[in-house]
Image: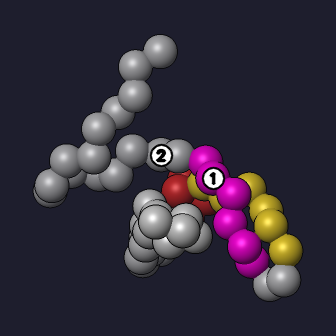
Amino acid sequence: MSEEIARVGKKAPDFKANAYVDGGFEKVSLSSHAGKWVVLCFYPGDFTFV
């Protein structure tokens, strides 16, 4: 299984992840927001004590 790589100027590859929504965790995917504006934020070490 090969993973797609995000590229500038190209459509973002679909993914599934856990997200904190309205007081609880749920599984979300990029494809579930097709046709809508989406802002993705990623903090790789946000909750680590480094």
Q: Which residue lies furthest to the bottom in this view?
A: 22
Q: Can residue 35 be seen in this view?
A: no
Q: Which of 15 and 37 is in front in this view?
A: 15
Magenta residues, start to end: 16-21
According to the picture, the residue beneath numbered tag 1 turns out to be 17
Q: Which residue lies furthest to the right in this view?
A: 24
Q: Which residue is drawn at 54% across and 68% down?
A: 49
Q: Residue furthest front?
A: 50
Residue 1 percent location from the top left of the image: 47, 15
**In this picture, is 10 found above or below 35?**
above
Residue 28 percent location from the top left of the image: 67, 58
Q: Which secondary structure is most common in the magenta stretch?
A: strand
Residue 12 percent location from the top left of the image: 34, 52
Of the two numbered discs 2 and 1 in the rendering, the one whose residue sits closer to the viewer: 1
**In this picture, is 43 found above or below 14?**
below
Residue 19 drawn in magenta: yes
- From the viewer's perspective, tell me whether residue 11 is left or right of residue 49: left
Q: Residue 14 carries which label?
A: 2
- Residue type marked 1: Ala
**In this picture, is 45 found above or below 2?**
below
Q: Residues within 10 Å of mark 1 (few under 14, many from 20)?
A: few
Q: Residue furthest left?
A: 9
| Circle 1 SS class | strand
Q: Which residue is drawn at 80% across and 67% down?
A: 25
Residue 45 percent location from the top left of the image: 46, 64
- Residue type marked 2: Asp
